[in-house]
Amino acid sequence: MAENDVKLLGSWPSTFVMRPRIALNIKSVDYDFLEEQIASKGELLLKSNPVYKKIPVLIHYGKPICESLIIVQYIDEYWSSGPSIFPSDPCDRAIARFWACYIDDKWFPLLRRLVVAQGDDAIKAALYPVVEGLVLLEDAFKNCSKGNKFFGGDKIGYVDIALGCFLGWMSVTEKMNNIKLLDEAKIPRLYKWAGDFCADSAVKDVMPETDKLAEAAKALLPKIRADASS
Amino acid sequence: MAEVKLLGFWYSPFTHRVEWALKIKGVKYEYIEEDRNNKSSLLLQSNPVHKKTPVLIHNGKPIAESMVIVEYIDETFEGPPILPKDPYDRALARFWAKFLDDKTAAMVNTFLREGEEQEKGKEEVWEMLKILDNELKDKKFFVNDKFGFADVAANFMGLWLGLFQEGSGVVVVTSENFPNFCAWRDEYVNCSQVKKYLPPRDELLAFFKAFLSAASASASASTSAKK
C-alpha cells in the first residue's frame, strides 16, 4: 500500500482516469492504482461515488474525491509544495478553468459522437465540429502558452491535462476511420503540443500506446456506444 | 483604478450567482443589463466562444462561466471566503456545484419544451432530486454546515425551480415526493446568508410566467404551422 494512503480507482484505457494520474505524477505522489473491471462496477466504486458511479475516484486517507478535474484541483491544492498545475495569477486561473469547462461541456461530447460514429456519412458529419473545436483550442493555446510548449507555459498545466488525456483515443479514432484530427496544416501549434505532451515524463507512462488502445477499443466500443445513446 | 463590470440578465440565476459573490465581498461594480435578443458588442467581444452572460470584466479582462467567475471573485477580492480553506472541503464544494449545474439543460427541457424532450428532462430532473433529497436530509448547507460555494450554485434549485413550476404549471417537486429537498429549500430562501441577496420573487415570477407562456405559444404556433 502506498505510504501516504492514496488510492485511485480507474482503468488504464480511460481518458478521465489519466487526468489524476498525470497530476499525481507531476507531484511525484505514489498511489495504489485499483483497476476497475469494464463489465461490472466494484463495491468500492459504488460506495465511493454513489452519485455518478464512475471512475476516476481518488481515495485519500479513506475519503473519496470524484470527478476528474475536481480531483486534479484537489491534488494541486493538497500537494501544494510540488510543481503547480494551475497558474498563479487569478485571471490566468479563471481562463484555465474556462477552457477546461469548454473541453468537457462542449468539445468532449462532440469527440464522443465521432468515436462512436459508424458509417462514412455519420463519421464525416461528426468529424467537422470536432475539428472546429480544435481550431478554437489552437487559438486558446496561442493565448495561454505565451510562446511556450504547453497551455500551462513551460510545463504541463490544467488545460494540458484536460485536453491531452484525449490524445490516445483521438489517435485510435484517426486510424480506425482513416481521418485526421491533429492536422498539422490546420492546427500546427496543437500538432506540436501533442507530441510534447505525450513525451512529458508525467504523461508517457500513463498514455496508452495506440495499438494497445485500438485492441482494447474493439471490446470497449459497444459499451461506449450504448452509454452514449442512453 | 480597479474597474469591475458585470454583463448579465437580471432574471438569470447564473448572473445572480456572480452578483451575490460581488456583494458578499463588498465589491463596487457597474451592472450592464443585456438583451438576449440584441446582445451588445461588448458581450460578443468579451465572450466570443459562448456569447452568453454572465461575463465579468475586471480591469478590461473578461471572465465567463458563472462558477468560474465566483471562484475568481473569491481569489481576487478581500472579504468573507466563499470556498472553504481545506482542500477536501473545497473538492466537496466543487463537486456539488458541478452536480447542481449539470442538470441545467434538463431543467430547461422540463419546463420549456414539450413531448419527448420534456419527458426526458423530467426523468433526469427526478433522478437529480432523488440524490439531493438524500444528500440534504437535515442539512442547511452543502459543506460542513457553513454557507459557501455550493450554496451559491444552489440558487437555481433553491429559488428558480419553484418559480419555473409556478410559472409553467409543470410540477416535479412536492413535499410528498421530496421532503428533505423541500425542507432544505424552505430554509434556504429564508436564511440570513441567502435572503438579503435574493432578487424579488414576485417580479421574477411575473417575468417567468410571461416568458414561459410566450415560449409555449410559439411552440404551439410552430407545431400548428407544421400540420
Image (spheres, coloured by chain):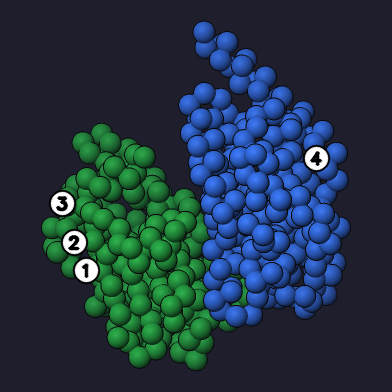
Chain colours: A green, B blue
Dot 4 and dot 1 residues touching (CB under 8 Å):
no
Same chain letter for marks 2 and 3: yes
Quick one: label 3 or label 1, which is nearer the N terminus? 1
Residue placed at 52% from the left, 23% from the top? Answer: B115
Going by the numbered disc 1, the residue's amino acid type is Pro
Q: Which residue is mark 2?
A: A213
Going by the numbered disc 3, the residue's amino acid type is Lys
**Is B75 left, or right, of A81 in this rendering?**
right
Q: Which residue is mark 3?
A: A218
Q: Which residue is mark 1?
A: A208
Badge 2 crowding class, 10 Å Cα cut-off, few under 14, some 14 to 19, many 20 or more, is some
Identify whether A76 is placed above or below B13.
below
Residue placed at 59% from the left, 74% from the top? Answer: B89
Dot 2 and dot 1 residues touching (CB under 8 Å):
yes
Q: Nearer the viewer, mark 3 or mark 1?
A: 3
Residue placed at 56% from the left, 68% from the top? Answer: B92
Label 2: chain?
A
Disc 4 is placed on an element classified as helix
Q: CA distance from mark 2 to mark 1?
A: 6 Å
Going by the numbered disc 4, the residue's amino acid type is Leu
Q: CA distance from mark 4 to mark 1?
A: 52 Å
Q: CA distance from mark 4 to mark 3?
A: 52 Å
